[in-house]
Image (cartoon, rainbow, N blue to C red):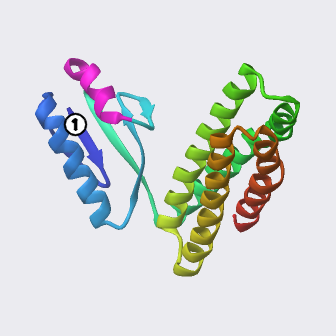
Amino acid sequence: MQVKLFDRTIEYENSAQTVEQMLAHTIEQVQNHGRYIHYFVVDGVDVYTDVYSYIIQRLANVRTVEVITMTKEQYAQYAKETIRAYIADISPDIEQLADEFYKGASSDTWQQFDRFLQALQLLHGAMEAWKDAADELKKQQIAVIQVELQEKLQQMLKALEVGDVVLIGDLICYEIVHVLEKIKSEG
């Protein structure tokens, strides 16, 4: 397979061990250039996650792998856009989710709550990426918001432990929404 990175093309053997070496070398080169991997293009297909598994599953047929990178500024902007998208995706459902807890939390409510927590986890990951690419002042501001969000999630965990569904609704509706608004305003 041919791997295109920056202005170079390197030929690699199509084997599992070589894929590991190729990815390690790619990551090292990208970091040495002060850039970030955005995604890979494997035989014309954009691959954003788990490129190793994607290549291994198609190992015998992979011909080209192009590495798409971003500058620190581009990476920070991408992370902010991702955060905005996560917030936009979960915002319409937050009030409804809180209302469901006020009404007594059905099994559907708990499924929605699980999806909500998964979205918050993705949001946390995007915030880590944003923080990684941010200047020092912004890193501090993001860290403060992350601590606040973590505190609210700890309060929610305590409410879960005692079965206080009304408190869970309050935390979602008032506290978590407030933190999400802070995150949006920082971007």
Towards the viewer: 74 or 147: 147
Question: How far across and down, in percent of the image, does residue 69 sit?
Answer: 41, 53
Q: What stretch is highlighted in magenta?
A: 50-62
- Residue 113 part of the magenta-drawn span: no
187 horizontally vs 127: left or right:
right
Q: Which residue lies furthest to the front in this view?
A: 162
- Which residue is depicted at the point 36% across and 67% down? 34
Question: Label 1's element?
Answer: strand
79 horizontally vs 172: left or right:
left
- Identify the main secondary structure in magenta: helix
Question: How far across and down, in percent of the image, does residue 153 sit?
Answer: 63, 52
124 horizontally vs 62: left or right:
right
Hey, what amino acid is under mark 1?
Answer: Gln
Q: Mark 1 points at which residue?
A: 2
Towards the viewer: 102 or 24: 102
Residue 28 to residue 13: above or below: below
- Which residue is depicted at the point 56% across and 52% down? 124
Question: How far across and down, in percent of the image, does residue 114 sit?
Answer: 63, 32
- Which residue is depicted at the point 64% across and 49% down? 158
* Quadrant housing the C terminus: bottom right
Question: How far across and down, in percent of the image, does residue 42 sit?
Answer: 35, 31
Residue 138 to residue 128: above or below: below
* Quadrant housing the N terminus: top left
- Which residue is depicted at the point 31% across and 62% down? 31
Q: Badge 1: few (under 14), some or many (20 or more) residues near its Cα, within 10 Å? A: some
Towards the viewer: 100 or 90: 100
Q: Residue furthest bottom?
A: 137
